[in-house]
Amino acid sequence: MTELKSPLLEQLPWLRHGFGTRSSPLNQNGMASLKQIHSAVVLVADRLEGCVGEGDALLTAAPGCTISVRTADCFPILLVDRTQRVVAVVHAGWRGTAARIAAEAVHQMRFTFGTRPEDVLAAIGPGIGACCYEVGEDVARQFDQDRTGRLDLAAHNIRQLENAGVPAGQIDYQATCTFCNAAQFYSWRRDKDMSARMISYVGLL
């Protein structure tokens, strides 16, 4: 299997999307992309291909435009406004999650394109699971945990999306840990500098 699909998003015939694996292409040719900086910065794609700027979420309502992020333990999140036909792609590591990048992407979809949160479908791709993600006290404090321990980034992003108005039944999470599954996924925490990055994308046909 070269890439993973969200059953929720596959219901939309006017959409293309995928979550990268080790078997997927490792470049973003033909896609708009970002210089990812672990932030809550959301940009609108102003071109069909190439780097749009520095940030960690990208939006578009342009048919034919595919937007993408690179991950290897951080979570790729795809957001789709099924009414206005607006899409977003989010790179959510611990810093971006602490800064509420997923909720900020929903907010910017609403501000820029008139998206209603209740019309948003969200798909969360593979990332490091709480089973494998031990963090120190400094990171734990960012998530209201008072001691070193395991961090469930996916759960925090799901909660942020729900708090932003996305209905719980419209959030798809496949619960696949990149660290656990070495044969299928790259993991920076497991492989360090030997790790490549996987490409996840969403676009309007």
Image: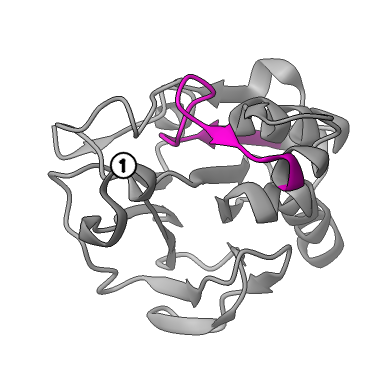
Vertical placement of 130 versus 2: above or below?
above
User: Within the magenta stretch, is there residue 128?
Assistant: yes
Judging by the rendered image, the residue that carries numbered circle 1 is: 190
Left or right: residue 184 versus residue 17 is left
Vertical placement of 21 versus 205: above or below?
above
Name of the residue lying farthest toward the top: 169
Task: Determine which quarter of the picture holds residue 168.
Answer: top right
| Rendered-image quadrant of the C terminus | bottom left
User: Within the magenta stretch, is there residue 27?
Assistant: no
Q: Position of residue 95 (x, y in %)?
A: 67, 55
Left or right: residue 142 versus residue 1 is right
Label 1: how many residues lie within 10 Å, few (<14), some (14-19) or many (20+)? some
Task: Determine which quarter of the picture holds residue 20.
Answer: top left
Q: Nearer the viewer, residue 54 or 84?
A: 54
Left or right: residue 179 versus residue 39 is left
Chain part drawn in magenta? 120-138
Q: Residue at 35% across / 34% down in the picture? A: 178
Q: Residue at 31% across / 42% down in the picture? A: 190
| Rendered-image quadrant of the N terminus | top left
Q: Position of residue 197 (x, y in %)?
A: 30, 57
Vertical placement of 31 versus 178: above or below?
below
The amino acid marked with disc number 1 is: Arg
Left or right: residue 140 versus residue 28 is right
Task: Determine which quarter of the picture holds residue 201.
Answer: bottom left
Q: Nearer the viewer, residue 174 or 106?
A: 174
Q: Residue at 17% across / 44% down in the picture? A: 22
